[in-house]
Image (cartoon, coloured by chain):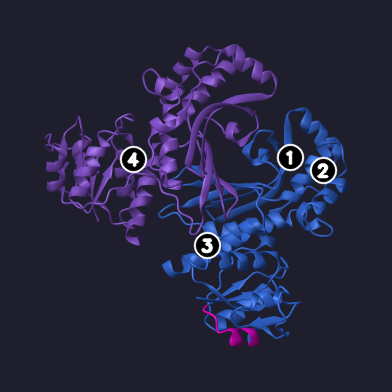
Chain colours: A purple, B blue
Amino acid sequence: MKIALIGFGNVGRALARLLSRKRAEFPFTIAGIHTLRHGTAVGEGVTPVLEGKTGGTTHPTSIEEFLDAARADIAVELTTLDPSTGEPAISHIRAAFARGAPVFNIWRHAMPGVKVLGFTGALNSTSKVVIETMERGGSFADGLSAARAMGITEADGAFDVEGWDSAAKTAALANVLLGARTTPQRVSTRGIGNLTPERVAEIARNGKTVRLVSRGRRTASGVSLRVRAEVLDRCDPLASLPGTSNIILFHTDLMGTFGTVSIEPTVEQTAYGVFSDLVDLPRR
Amino acid sequence: MKIALIGFGNVGRALARLLSRKRAEFPFTIAGIHTLRHGTAVGEGVTPVLEGKTGGTTHPTSIEEFLDAARADIAVELTTLDPSTGEPAISHIRAAFARGAPVFNIWRHAMPGVKVLGFTGALNSTSKVVIETMERGGSFADGLSAARAMGITEADGAFDVEGWDSAAKTAALANVLLGARTTPQRVSTRGIGNLTPERVAEIARNGKTVRLVSRGRRTASGVSLRVRAEVLDRCDPLASLPGTSNIILFHTDLMGTFGTVSIEPTVEQTAYGVFSDLVDLPRR
């Protein structure tokens, strides 16, 4: 199967490495790579060109020209998303659908016959680093600096601490798991912007801590989705996982509450999520 | 697809309820039920007979006679296992294979292309209840009584606190995930039998606790499998989940460390595990 790769940042590069490593077992080839800032290349063996390892040439082109030239079976969209507009992913996906290429870039969860009734997750690492920094006596700004130094947040960190990263993940989970048709803007969201070192210390003296928690559940009228700073026991599974680890608990009809944890995930795991979608394609 | 159900205890009954509930979506029927102590019934609609809800008749028979009469597509083995002999399940499964019926009664985990390098789990609830009872000032025997009252352990509890329940689960995980061909007897196992309330209290004063932990990993020469009482931070995810919840962390090549948690699972979840195997059959 030939893949048209749209976006070639950290995840795209990790996916290219993974596909190369698993080629004997899973015969996917990259038929072309389209980037916003580093040009576009089409034809098998393009990966080294864009990684600057060979003398091959690339040239900028539109998404439509790229897809027409790549003639791939599948388009994989991995560009950086503007969460308020959904761009440029929406335009890329529209162009791919117009050419009949399936597009997969979202983690899917399927358990036959199980209905997910709701979910609870602590999905934002930057806010956790900020809170842990304040627990150790640092300031809010110190925490943001620490998160930046770890490479887990953008320049000003507002997207994370104001809850929008969590809201985007909450909306995506709700769309996939609860059949919602929603957007991050429609998630009731409050961040940790008002949290002070004094308040964090007071909470810690009671053996508790704070986490930015995403909650979604089905209701009679649709779905209820919210992101809030919640006071949790220090040993609560939503609070106690190390470093950048994350946890999501799923509340279901047949399976009770079960969950998944990812311990200090890296870009390799994100790439694997895309890879497993690709492998799953022939089964659908 | 017609199912021959061997064993009709708590899990078998929960599975029958689940199949009935999901019949419109997943057209499985129970063609017969074989029990060790409550007779055998063959023919569609047998479930109410064995539940004593109708006046139908049942009669004891051998496993071979039962399988010949049921003429099912699939046999599901859910009897209580003697972990030292593997019986009666082994005889049941041999009889089913001799008749060409596939047999599925183990949870399977599959992620395409991922190699599991090892796993770590806290899989035994009885030992946890005993430890928590001692942390609250009770005796070892008090803890066993509490576990019995919760319905999570057998008469004397030795199977749990001496580590054999954990060893059986460790061997099963190793066989499925690590390609081991092993038995519980070959897992290096030490239980919590020597743990005293005094020692537990001393550990608790340092902010720590004890859990019976199963560990498996691939080695150059095969697999290394062990069950040990380990001292853990009170907030360690292996220690902090509530009640009878369990957690397994998988160490992998492509996915780093990820895990699954099951919050206070009941027999309904066990039945769902069998159900999902059944649903998965046509895809194989």
Rendered residue at 73%/77% (across/down):
B36
Mark number displayed over residue A14 = 4
Query: Which is more toward the observer, A21 or A158?
Result: A158
Disc 4 and disc 2 in contact, CB within 8 angstroms: no
Query: Which residue carries the number 1 mark?
Result: B210
Query: Mark 1 or mark 3, which has the lower sequence index?
Result: 1
Query: Which is more toward the observer, B248 or A184?
Result: A184
Mark number displayed over residue B195 = 2
For label 3, the crowd category at 10 Å Cα-Cα, with few meaning under 14, some 14 to 19 and many 20 or more, is: some
Amino acid carrying mark 4 in the image: Ala
Rendered residue at 85%/39% (across/down):
B197
Amino acid carrying mark 3 in the image: Ser
State how far apart marks 1 and 3 are (Cα).
34 Å
Where, quadrant-wise, is the C terminus of chain B in this rendering?
A: bottom left
Query: Mark 1 or mark 2, which has the lower sequence index?
Result: 2
Disc 4 and disc 1 in contact, CB within 8 angstroms: no
**Mark in the foreground, 2 or 3:** 3
**Mark in the foreground, 3 or 4:** 3
Query: Which residue carries the number 3 mark?
Result: B276
Q: Is residue B83 left or right of residue B28?
A: right
Amino acid carrying mark 1 in the image: Val
Question: Which type of secondary structure does the marked residue at label 2 adopt?
Answer: loop
**Chain for numbered disc 4:** A
**Chain for numbered disc 3:** B
Amino acid carrying mark 2 in the image: Leu
Question: Which type of secondary structure does the marked residue at label 3 adopt?
Answer: helix
